[in-house]
Structures are given as structure tokens and as C-alpha cells.
Amino acid sequence: MISDSSLTQAFAAAFSGNPALIARAPGRINLIGEHTDYNGGFVFPAAIAYEIKMAARAATGSVTRLHSVNYNENFEYDTAEGLPEPGETHWYSYWLGVCLQFEEKGFTIPALEVAIHGDVPLGAGLSSSAAFEVCAATLLNYVLNAGIDAKDLALMAQAAEHSKYVGVMCGIMDQFASALGEQAHALLLDCHSTDYERVPCDPTGASIVIINSNKHRELRSSEFNTRRRECEEGLRLLNGLSGADYPTLRHVPQDVFDAHAGALPEKVRQRVKHNLAENARVMRFVDALKANDWTTAGTELYASHASLRDDYEVSCSELDAIVDIARESGLAHGCRMTGGGFGGCAVALVPPHQVDAFIANMQSQYPQRTGLQPTIYQSEPVQGANVYSAG
Ligand code: GLA
């Protein structure tokens, strides 16, 4: 949590005086449903108590000034000259990407002074960039009195990430969780229709423990885009082979895949196999959660990890070590890598009375197996983005 008073002080140091508004947007943890969102599938994330906050006020004159507390950097541009052209991706690129979405809807954004501070770990697969985008979108929606609902703000935040300022072709999960999360609930999202259901997460049955592998995510965006292409290829081939016209991979029935799997290139077959199985796992996991059946829920987590490791090939030895340690300890219901993969975090569901033992065991075992220190976070699901008076 970033306190309003520390952010207000940072604002005063950067611009002098006080902000008028504060917007906040959380990061997310995905409980299950990985690499399914951009294939029209199901995901089950929750917003977490690590967030981005922006304190803002109207500027006098036409220059917008941004101050990043995390980077101790400023960025400014003259709104009279329009949005600056994109360069390399920096923290402020996400701001510009969001501004572009509002401008494309016909809004004129006034000059602002904005101080920005976040505690979502960067590059850890907990969606610091989605939190930034959703925070900026929530702030601008208020400033412009635009009346855009949270779902459309999430879609605009995703479009910001796809825009020329960032250029990552992410799915919709992260921005949705940040915009629409609810305290003590996870979000079952159908990424094709964007219909969603908020499902209670009973904290007496399991605590959410997040283990950061602290493995730097190499190859992440190039491999991410490759997986997307392989899935698109799988859909195209399966539609051709079956003579059907399924709109997304999630619509392909299992028996149609089974009938034609042999005709698919090996990697494409594996990616499709993961997607169909993962969608089914999400549904079983949610049913198990509703029934307080933690054993089944945990089994689905381990199965999801194995599929991401073997069929989707987005895990790494460090994430595999975390999951192995969790399983061998017998102290967790289940554990899996979470987010895009190639490093970043794993999520474990742990019986509350075993959390301390689970963490102590992870802290001693993981360095022995990998030579890296883990960072461990705990969070129950929190409320999605909002904006309020800084008064
Ligand atoms: C990243 C993307 C999401 C999703 C996950 C994998 O976090 O931003 O849209 O595709 O990877 O599930």
C-alpha cells in the first residue's frame, strides 16, 4: 500500500502545493487460466494489495508534468503540441498510451501535474503495467467527466498496451482484474464475451502466497508473441481441417481437437492442447472453490503448472523449483507459475495455519536449489481501481 500522505508529500516536493485527486489501481494475481485470455478462454485472477497511485491537479498553462517517485524522474510535454511521438518504452509510455485512447474517443485532455508511486513489483508478472494503465484511465475518466464504465476503461487500458507507445499484444485479463476486482473475491472472466462473475475466496480455507522467483524474465515479449501466433495458427488449421468456423480456440470442442491433433505441427498441437485443458481446469477449480474442496482446487493448480511447463513451454527451472518445493513440503493445497512466465512469480494456496511453515521452508529450500533468494508476498483479494478527492 502506498499511503496518501507519502504520495501527497512527493507531489508537493515535485510541484509544490497539494494535489486535488488521487487515483489508485491494483496489480493482480492470476489463480488459474494462463495464456488463455488472448484465445477467448477463461481466466480467474484477483486484484492484490500492491498498487499504483497517482496524485493529480490541473496545471496552469499548457504543459503536463509527470513525476515518477519510483524512478525519481520527471517527464513533461506541451499539450498544445499534441502527444509526443513514441520512442523507447519508459514508465511514461503507458501514460501516453492511455491519453491516446481518450484522444481517439474525441476527448481533449487538459494539462495536468501528476505524481506517480507504485509498490507492485516491477517485471514480476503481477501486472505493474496494467495497474499503471488502469490508474491513468481511471484518473482521466474522472478529470474529463467522461462517464466510461470500468469494463470499457479496462479495454482502453489494454489498447494502451497494444498502442505504438508500448506495443505488447497482451490479453485482457490484467487490466480487467485491476479495474473490476472486488475485496475477498476473484474474477471468473470469459475473455470472449467479457462477461464475468465475482466468486468469493474464503480466506479461512486458503491464504494466497505469492513467491517471486527473482529470475529476470528474458525473451518474455518475443516468446509471448510467438505463443500468440502459434495459437492463431492452431485455430486456423483446426477450422480448415474440421470445416468449422470456431471464433476462438476456446470454442474448439475437445473431440474435434482429438480427431485432428495428429495433423498439426508439434508445437501448435501442444499449445492448443494446453488451452483446451486449461479452460476445463478453470471451471473445475472454480467449482471446487465454491464447494470449499481445497484438495481438488490444489490438484488443478499443480496440473496447470505441468501443462504450462511441458505443453506451453513458458516456465523456467526456477519456477519449476518453487512448485516442486511446495509439493514436496506437503504444506500447500497447490502451487503454479502465474502470469506470462519465463520468470516472475508462482502462486500457492496454503492452509492459513501452515503459512508460516510454508514460507520458512520456501526461504530455506529455494536458494539451495537455484542460488536465488525468493521474495514472498501475501495478499487477500482487494477492491479494483477508484479515484477520490485528495482533501
Ligand atoms: C501476461 C498478459 C496477460 C496474459 C498472461 C498469461 O500477463 O499480459 O494478458 O496473457 O500473460 O496468462
Image (cartoon, rainbow, N blue to C red):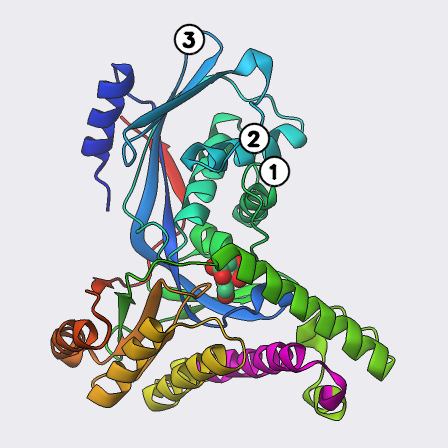
Circle 2 — which element? Answer: loop
Label drawn at residue 86 = 2
Classify 10 as above or below 207: above
Instruction: Please report contact status of discs 1 and 2: CB closer than 8 Å, yes or no.
Output: yes
Residue drawn at 83 percent across, 82 percent down: 241
Amino acid type, label 1: Lys
Q: Is residue 384 left or right of residue 121?
A: right
Q: Nearer the viewer, residue 321 or 379?
A: 321
SS state under label 1:
loop
Would you say the residues marked 3 and 2 are in contact, meaning their CB atoms lie under 8 Å apart? Answer: no
Residue 80 occupies which quadrant of the picture?
top right
Residue pictured at 46% horizontal, 13% vertical: 63
Looking at marks 3 and 1 on the same chain, the residue that comes earlier in the sequence is marked by: 3
Q: Of the residues shown, which amino acid type is indicated by label 3?
A: Thr
Residue 58, magenta (yes or no): no
- The reply to whether residue 192 is visible in this rendering is no
Q: What label sits on residue 60 in the rendered view?
A: 3
Where residue 106 sits in the image (x, y, percent)? 67, 27
Mark 1 surroundings within 10 Å by alpha-carbon count, few (fewer than 14), some (14 through 19), many (20 or more): some
- The magenta-colored residue range is 261-285
Q: Residue at x 68, y 88 (%)?
A: 254
